Image (spheres, grey):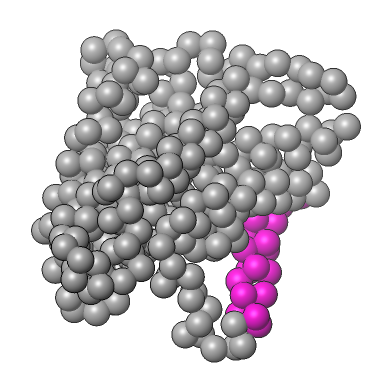
Amino acid sequence: MIWADQIVQGIFLGGYYALIACGLSFMFGVLRIINLAHGSIAVLSAYLVWMLADRWNVSPFLALVAIVPAMAAAGWLLQRTVLERSLRSGALTPLLSTFGLAVMLDNLLFEKFGADTRSLAPNIGDLAFNSWTVGGGVTIGQLALLTFGVALALLGGLQLFLNRTPLGRAIRATAEDADTAELVGIDSRRVYAAAAAIAIATVAIAGTFLGMRATFDPYTGPAQLIFAFEAIVIGGTGSLWGTLIGGIVLGVAQNLGSQVSPRGFLIAGHAVFFVVLAARFVLAGRDPRTLFGALRRAPI
């Protein structure tokens, strides 16, 4: 039954990957930007929550009430001051801009906090390690279940927001064709800024769960970016629910791979990613320009 337990743990791990990939997928689908600072922003959020929890002795969940709006405002400012101008210079400039932002954030965090690892686990008490054992020796961690539930709620909430609200429909229209959206009175600059704010706000939530489930340091961000990117490519770029599927596939592959070899955790995940990438390349007719054709789709 050890394999059944590993599959279940992989599914819950996939919930975390979907959570960390949500903001990247959203920004990718709307702004057509691969935010290379995504993981670093998640780690920054974890540090901000840790500072509030450590200094004021409050729950990380309560600290999120202050951090999420602050990170949303930072996302809006990032779009208006950096990303908007970068997009005018072609597709490569936003990549370079967000890469530079990631380097700056990593080194600023190192300057401020040093190389010591931190964790939010001590601030959530028994939730960090409590679990239930069900039939067949399968263990369900309370924090893992909560993480999966938050991922479902966030993805579902974003999907409802996109489908049922005026701003959500404006985001979908702008993502599909910004020029046409402008013709019917939609302010694309406002829409893009709002989308960036939403994306960065979700990163703040993901960063908090990163801090609760594991340790983090100033240079944890790049690994989280890789996992998030693999999840959205496996599940299909521009699809919120595809992000969840991709995260689960990645998590299950990693957990099963760890049973084969101590190094199999990362190797299996990367192998699945490259297999999916190769399959997309073949199905796209071996034309690299159509490999990520889903970039032209709205995040629905």
Magenta stretch: includes residue 196: no
Q: Toward which corner of the image does residue 186 lie, by quadrant? A: bottom left
Q: Relative to 198, is 10 on the left or the right?
A: right
Above or below, comparing residue 71 to residue 38 in the picture: above
Q: Residue at x 41, y 63 (%)?
A: 298
Residue 125 image point, x, y percent: 48, 11
Q: Residue at x 82, y 36 (%)?
A: 4
Tag count in the figure? 0
For this orientation, the residue located farthest to the front is: 184
| Nearer to the camera, 217 or 200 | 200
Residue 221 image point, x, y percent: 39, 48
Task: State whether residue 146 appears in this view.
Answer: yes
Q: Residue at x 37, y 20 (%)?
A: 61
Q: Quadrant of the N terminus?
A: top right
Q: Relative to 263, is 67 on the left or the right?
A: left
Q: Residue at x 11, y 58 (%)?
A: 81
Magenta stretch: includes residue 272: yes
Q: Relative to 29, is 269 on the left or the right?
A: right
Task: State whether residue 116 appears in this view.
Answer: no
Residue 224 image point, x, y percent: 46, 49
Above or below, comparing residue 250 to residue 277 in the picture: above
Above or below, comparing residue 261 to residue 233 in the picture: above
Magenta-highlighted residues: 261-283
Q: Relative to 84, is 109 on the left or the right?
A: right
Magenta segment's dominant SS is helix
Residue 278 image point, x, y percent: 64, 76
